[in-house]
Amino acid sequence: MCGIIGAIAQRDVEPILIEGLRRLEYRGYDSAGLVVLNPDAGLQRERAVGKVEALAQRLAGDGLRGTLGIAHTRWATHGSPTEYNAHPHMSRDHIAVVHNGIIENYAEIRGELKAKGYTFTSDTDTEVIAHQIMDYCLQGLDLLESVQRAVTHFTGAYALGVIARDQPDRLIAVRQGSPLIIGVGIGEHFIASDIQAMLPVTQRFIYLENGDLAELRRDQVRLFNAELQPVERPLTESSLTAGAADRGRYRHFMLKEIHEQPRAVAETLEGRLSGDGVLEGILGPDSEALLKRVKSLQILACGTSYHAGMVAGYWIEGLLGLPCRVEVASEFRYRRHAVLPDCLLLTISQSGETADSLAALRQAREDDYLGALAICNVPESSLVRESDMVLMTHAGPEIGVASTKAFTTQLVALFLLVLALGRHHGLDAARIRHFVEQLRTLPAVMEKVLHLDAPIERLAMSLVEKQHALFLGRGCHYPIALEGALKLKEISYIHAEAYPAGELKHGPLALVDADMPVVVVAPNNALLEKLKSNLEEVRARGGHLLVFTDDVEALGHDGAIQSLAVPPVDDWLSPIIHTIPLQLLAYHTAVLKGTDVDQPRNLAKSVTVE
Ligand code: AGP
């Protein structure tokens, strides 16, 4: 999704902007650009389609000189990914704007501004912002006031960075819906969509709230609400360092993040378990009383986080007998729904900035839920700030677009929630103790699974030439099949679909032939015999089976099936373990195909627009 970085300093800002853009690359984009205000030459713009490197190369040599600038990575929404659509957008060489979000009513505003004589040079919704601000400047309003008045015209979501040719000492920012953070330095200040972009220059941040405007000068940051009344927002210090987003010895961030899972899971468990149970109050000081009252749950999320929610649905109904609905946020937000009795609302998100999840949360808050709990990986995110209770995953920054460690840590956090609820909803102490013991073994078991990297790479060789793949699972392993298929399609561009294995003969079996690899998640549990019949159905049609199991013997391996054994754990927790080989399978297939693993085409890390 689009990324913004801006700087006002006492040194040339171009290197800060380019490094910031590189650190925003993981969000996904198709073009990049920047504007620097040069005291003699005015607003100097450079833009390029493709990677930030292409932009950096254009600037090689003298570069742009100036101590105030804004920059942007664009993920096309309105208008194709071309240089003329890339940001920053300008009005009459006087105003320059970078924008993350979507102006829904831009067509109407564009018409009005054209009638006033403004010329449009792009197909974007953003260009109306530059001209609308310019229009107020021409009416004699100050730059800050012009921005404040301009945004009253817009419906939709926006985070904006704005500079003006005649204002060398001010950088204006405003946010509504899309995230924007101020980086506080000494004699220099910054704006960005994400703290990652600013970590090389500061670790002190102010998170703007919806409707906030900011005026950055070299020696001062002033914040205002939508009515231009001064407001104060807390300054937070991040413990993250610029190096936290390095690939280290790994070829890709995704591979690094897959290998970080044992540590990430250990950190998610850290401080939450007692000797034989889950500590009280892991969701916050008053949470136990609320957990007692819960009679049902509604889970909302998108993509991989939705798959984590689906697994939790099986856990909550299967272990606690509490009704649990799980729905993708983009569907939930646009339909009338009945609230279950005494229902806890649970949102799950890695970024905490996913537009659909946030909108669903905001809409659900108008209904009669007991409270809103967020499971999230970014402490300062909008989702965390807008929820009543939080259970943080401690995965650390996830840079690869394909979510890996965020997913397994979400599952661990969700299982902690199940145990915390279980205390009040019929899970006996011995069972809780057993699960706690099992949770503690997970990091070591995950390490063992990671040692299967080489055989999984060999399995990937049989996928790489294929056009399609089917993934099968049953029970709480069905969402793991969905997640495996999502990983494969995201990064290798092989079309992959997942089905509950019992559904095979109700349609997808028609697709099975020698060219259709069928990947199966097959732990040795009560459903294994049923699953074996499904495997036979595939085998009889000449389908190529790749089976991940924790018991090769029980599977009845006879050489006709390519299988790989993962270490056994309690069946309720085995979705967490069975996820890892599917991540590695997708990773190696993508590497063999030569795709862009960390930044797959058309995708964004954090989907901050609808
Ligand atoms: C995962 O591999 C995806 N890139 C994507 O489905 C992601 O999980 C989804 O966009 C939700 O993101 P969130 O967890 O940050 O809300």
Image (cartoon, rainbow, N blue to C red):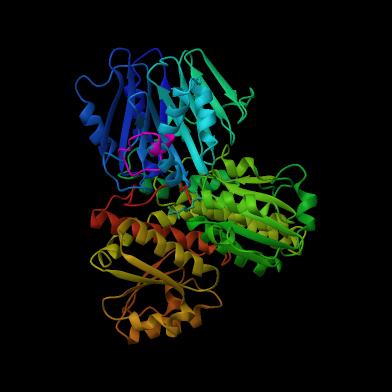
Q: Position of residue 162 (x, y in %)?
A: 43, 27
Q: Position of residue 104 (x, y in %)?
A: 48, 47
Camera-side residue: 42 or 521?
A: 42
Could you tell me if residue 268 is visible in this image?
yes
Q: Position of residue 542 (x, y in %)?
A: 29, 83
Left/right placement of residue 372 relative to residue 597 reads: right
Is 153 situated above or below 556? Answer: above
Q: Within the magenta stretch, is there residue 50?
A: no
Camera-side residue: 359 or 298?
A: 359
Which residue reaches farthest left?
61
Residue drawn at the location 50% of the way across and 82% of the way down: 529
Q: Which segment is the magenta one?
A: 115-129
Magenta span main SS: loop
> For residue 494, which quarter of the picture?
bottom left
Camera-side residue: 30 or 383?
A: 30
Which residue reaches farthest front?
115
Camera-side residue: 240 or 452?
A: 240
Is 515 situated above or below 273? Answer: below
Is 274 situated above or below 333? Answer: above
Is 394 situated above or below 476? Answer: above
